[in-house]
Image (tube, rainbow, N blue to C red):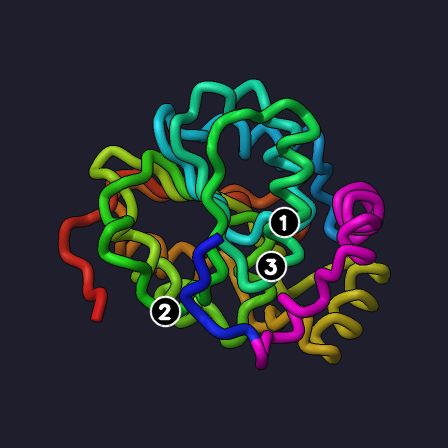
Amino acid sequence: MVNTKEDDNMHPSAALYTRFVLRGYDFVVLQFSNAFAWCCPTDSALLPLFRQHIGAQAHLDVGPGSGYYLAASAAELAEVERLTLVDLNPDALQYTKERLQAVGHTRTMETMIHDVFKPFPSAMHGQYDSISMFYVFHCLPGAFPHKARDVITRLKPLLKPSAVFYGATILGQAHNWLGNCLMDLYNGKGVFCNKEDTREGLEEALAEHYEEVEVRIVGRVALFVARKPTIKCNVS
């Protein structure tokens, strides 16, 4: 495991994911909340997106959570030569690594404790065919397009010219009653920071750094795919 940041002052959105919480994550978030609060089914909307864009040789997953998407994509990952997991929380990284091993993933996995607002090591630049980032943006402090722009600036140098950056994030407006209650609760506790997050803000940030951008809304979740990273990038 590579640690590029001290986690003594871990943000609440990352600190939440203890091993105890991760054991219930699939049911609470992926089954219940996705279906009834965010109206974006995991199995028919999010998982197919995750599987579809996994790169052929090297894939990086930001914020793996419980590792559900990775474990459910074991067949697609079987031929991937390099798999890197990035999170601020070491429990989430270890939990995901163990879960992948349990479903028979035998290839080497790299785990990195890292803040996505900070630059990545230069040795990682240009190494990845794909980067996935599911349910991370809405947990990050700040608002669209600024926080998305900052993160994209750090991740883009890691991609190969033909690579894809994709994922999903919960938007901040027009939820149903349950969604509004959860939004107020999670934003109040600092687990979410997405009340000002809009589709337009996400599209704006992605379009600054990629030639091809697709954003599709399912319920209150934005599913995004960005291809052909532009050459110019400020990584200072």
Q: Residue 25: x percent and y percent?
A: 78, 50
Residue under pointer 1: 94
Give the residue type that dot 2 points to.
Answer: Lys
* Stretch in magenta: 8-37
Residue 7 sits in which quadrant? bottom right
Residue placed at 23% from the left, 44% from the top? 126
Find the distance from the CA under tag 3 to the CA under tag 2: 17 Å
Residue placed at 56% from the left, 53% from the top? 63
**Does residue 222 appear left or right of residue 179 in this picture?**
left
Per the rendering, the mark at residue 90 is: 3
Q: Is residue 191 above or below residue 43?
A: below
Give the residue type that dot 1 points to.
Answer: Gln
Judge whether residue 225 can be spotted in this image: no
Per the rendering, the mark at residue 198 is: none
Q: Secondary structure at mark 2?
A: loop
Q: Nearer the viewer, mark 3 or mark 2?
A: 3
Q: Residue 135: x percent and y percent?
A: 60, 53
Q: Residue 21: x percent and y percent?
A: 80, 57
For the residue pair 78 and 205, the one nearer the viewer reads as 78
Find the distance from the CA under tag 1 to the CA under tag 2: 22 Å
Quarter of the image containing the C terminus?
A: bottom left
Give the residue type that dot 3 points to.
Answer: Pro
Residue under pointer 2: 118
